Amino acid sequence: MWPYVLKRILWFIPTLFAVTLIGFILLANAPGDAVDSLVMSSNSGGSLKTTQDIEQQKTYWRKQLGLDLPLFYFSICKLSEPDTLYKIHDETQLEKVNEQIKTTEGYRNYLPKIVWYGSSNQYHRWLFGGFNSKGIIRGDFGLSISKKEPVIVIIKDKLIWSLFFSILSIILAYAISIPIGIKIAQQPESKFSKSSQFILFLMYSMPSFFVGVLLLMLFANPDILSIFPPSGIKPIEGYYDHASLIEKFIVSVPYMILPLICYTYSSLAFITKLTATSIQEQLQLDYIKTAKAKGLSSNSIIWKHALKNSALPLITVFSTVFPSIVGGSVIIESIFTIPGMGLETVRAIIAQDYPVVIAIITLSSILTIFSYLLADILYAWIDPRIRITK
Amino acid sequence: MKSLLYPLLFILSITFTSSCKKTQSNTLVVHLLSEPDDMHPTNGASAVRAEINLYTNLSLLRVNYKTGELLPCLAKSLPTVSEDGLNYSYELKDNMTWDDNSPITANDIAFTTKASKCLYTNNIGLKPYWENIDDIIVDSKNNKKFTIKMKRPYILNTWFWTDFPIVQAAFYDKQNVLAKYSNAQLTDSTFLKSKQDIKQWADEFNSPKYSTDTQFMSGAGPYKITKWDKGVSITLEKKKNHWSENCQENWYCQANPDKIILKLNNNNASALLELKNGLIDVSTMIDYSSFTELSKDEAFKKDFTLKLADTYNYTYVAMNMKPDGKKHKKLFTDVNVRRAMALLTPYNQINKTLYENNNKQVVGPISPNKIDFNADLKPLEYNVEQAKELLKQAGWADTDNDQVLDKMIDGEKTKFEFNINFISGSKVWEDLAKQLAESFGKANIYVMLNPLDYNGFFSSVTGHSFDMSISAWQSSAPPEDFSQLWSSASWANNGLNFTGFGTPQSDALIDSINTCMDEPKRIALSKRFQKLVYDEQPYIFMFTQTRRVIVNKKWDNLEIYTEYPGVLLNTLKLKD
């Protein structure tokens, strides 16, 4: 098994490289320009801005941020295109130049060429460092363009809350839904089965923004019931000085309940249904009949034999849910004012803060690859018939 | 089951009610919609940062919120201006000091200017605002006196200072590096290349600690940022033994609440519940429908004051007057068509359905709340028949009976159909676009809605790649400089003049306004310019936006202003 794991870890490198590169190129080609946003971001009144002032500033800061460099080590373009076309950032000007090339260069417009830029490119700088970053290779995601803070600092704070809610909700979802799923599978025609399936179906159909607001209106509303705080993750004035981690947790418990319900309920429905179906399938198989014939108790059959063999789909679900913890949930974070990754991702995309976005993409990719690897190992552990030597 | 449920709810309520505890003591909790990107003294640009700076920093001059006029702050009085309008002489007050009790001197003003102008500092969006300052000459005999030399006369040469906090040279430049160089040198990229000391200073000055670490935030205002819990709240605490302690004479030196907590909440539903729970004392940011809901809640009104306040901001629908003719057809090049679009806009219906009838219609490029507003310009009324007549005069007719107007433009039959762009995610703007589309349809104009993300929207308008777009402008008390939004140059360089409005005459008029130091004369010129824009109708001018002010009645001394942020938090007093 270990050579296989090592081989998979080695595959991480080219996969990560490809994912980050695709993310990098997509972001670089998104509408708008980070430097334009910076220049236009002032909220003050009038000024004596002139074209020259603005262009001078844009050029200077484009250079400072490394945005004046070509995107990648090489580019594939038309033979007619000049090698320095990447230096034009103004879309109107670029359109004019392209139009001119199109009309004057004839057959050269139909022949491709590869232009080599060497290591002086944006992707290389992001990977290996330069200007204000040591590079992702050395664990430095660089500085956020809009917040001017190290990306890792921005992400660290937000990631803690997203990880907390996501991991807790995954644990809760599995802990609650597996026993319910088993009960449904054991007595599919019982009242409990029918009513719980109806409720689960209802829960699965309800969007999280609706459930979030509904929970708030029911349990944080002085007109109905004001049990939970309506927003935030801790008291307005924060934790008291020198509070321990456990004390902080206890103080924050009331703030966590409604968001946690919101995070958990839809996966709860899904995993319960999956468990029930999977166990029901197992219960029809011959080995279960043999176990019954041997006189094993119902609980022993279910928990020791059927559950283990029906766990494969549950592991598959886990491997797809797990990477999403880095992305957080924009809707739930917005409703309950949780300073998590979801809102930060949206902010970074809107601000074209590409160091932050790429960092999030990279972290999500690492987790995705890691969770698939984990799933493979778990498959083999649960079902020895699955071999992972290749 | 039921027997278990009620005791459980009871226990939960007992346990958790403690978490909904309102803050005691002299602490003001304020609703914040978004937090600032950074709190750097010179490099940040967000509106929230500007609001916080009102309490943590001081400027040379401030706005008198009551009158909308200039108010000396660090300066003893308004400056003496030379006849050519280029030299502004100031003297600083004596009693104001930094946190280390050192006096605020002209060197701090000179340092603030140099730090802002220096090419290495990271205030890219703000540098052009400092461009007009040529130099600052400190009086060699009195370091409280100085003269600011400007490059050009300009109406905002004094107002400019209200926007920027003065920072302490000794705190941000301990080696006194910038004092060795002139403003001209600091803006000369060739000169800077050989100056490593400036580069080192700038790298330190630009470093994130000055943007986000409260230990490295220093200002002369009566409050200090003591905690910034990212994504949650920002806490300002009143400084102890500060010079402003007994100062009540002007708003900027008052510090009535001991603590001001700016609490982030960008969700209307939970913000509304926080208000109802008494967890927020002040909000100016809740949406119209929530405000209306709270206005009808008698129990809520017992504890809270609810008022609608005017602002200088306005919404508009821009029309592309100079499209390329290929990707975007020449639909709005004729003034009659633009006027027709304005006449097809159901202002009253929109105001009622989207803004609960709270907004005022605007007629030109300036809020009716400003002193230079041209009151002779009459609002256009919704009139479909008149609009149809204007469209007919412009040559538009439904020649093929397909219920869409058409016209031969540049030898090509063109249908009157186009996209309305707006930033996605705003329900109000989406509804506004829908109502416009429906109304334009009455004159056989076919409209498609085109929601875009912020960057897509911004690049479409600045790149002139749009037909019609919905947006809003934020404005403030200072005299209006029309160049950014209306000069031809601002269209040519892909600035904020999206529509293509502008002629040599209008540009000359803008220049005259910008350099006219005689207030009545400037107002007359401004009115002329407004008439010019009104006649051309590059925008469908929609509404001024109102601020929804909600303040807990336990706070006294409430005054509401047109100028942002509408309520000065430091002036609110806790009732006995």
Image (tube, helix red, strand yellow):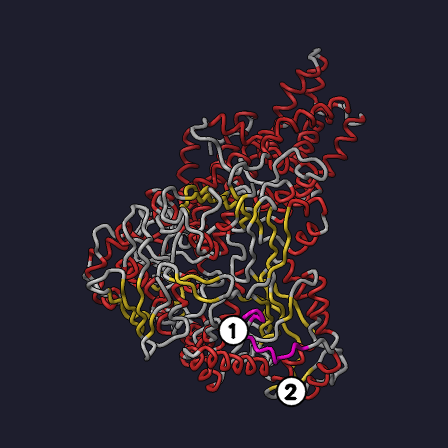
Residue that mark 1 sits on = B498
Q: Position of residue B327 (x, y in %)?
A: 56, 75
Vertically, is B516 above or below A307? below
Which quarter of the rendered picture does the N terminus of chain A lie within?
top left
The residue closer to the viewer here, B158 or B490, is B158
Report the mark closest to the observer, 1 or 2.
1
Mark identifier at residue B99? none
Q: Is residue B76 magenta?
A: no
The span shown in magenta is B367-380
Report whether A6 appears left or right of B429.
left
Q: How many marks?
A: 2
| Magenta span dominant secondary structure | loop
Q: Amino acid at mark 1?
A: Phe
Q: Position of residue A44 (x, y in %)?
A: 44, 64
Residue at image coords 35%, 73%: A52
The residue closer to the viewer here, A371 or A164, is A164
The residue closer to the viewer here, B513 or B519, is B519
Residue that mark 2 sits on = B408
Q: Secondary structure at mark 2?
A: strand
Q: Label 2 marks which chain's residue?
A: B
Q: Label 1 marks which chain's residue?
A: B
The residue closer to the viewer here, B75 or A16, is B75
Q: Please identify the quarter of the rendering in which residue B129 is found.
A: bottom left
Residue at image coords 59%, 87%: B410
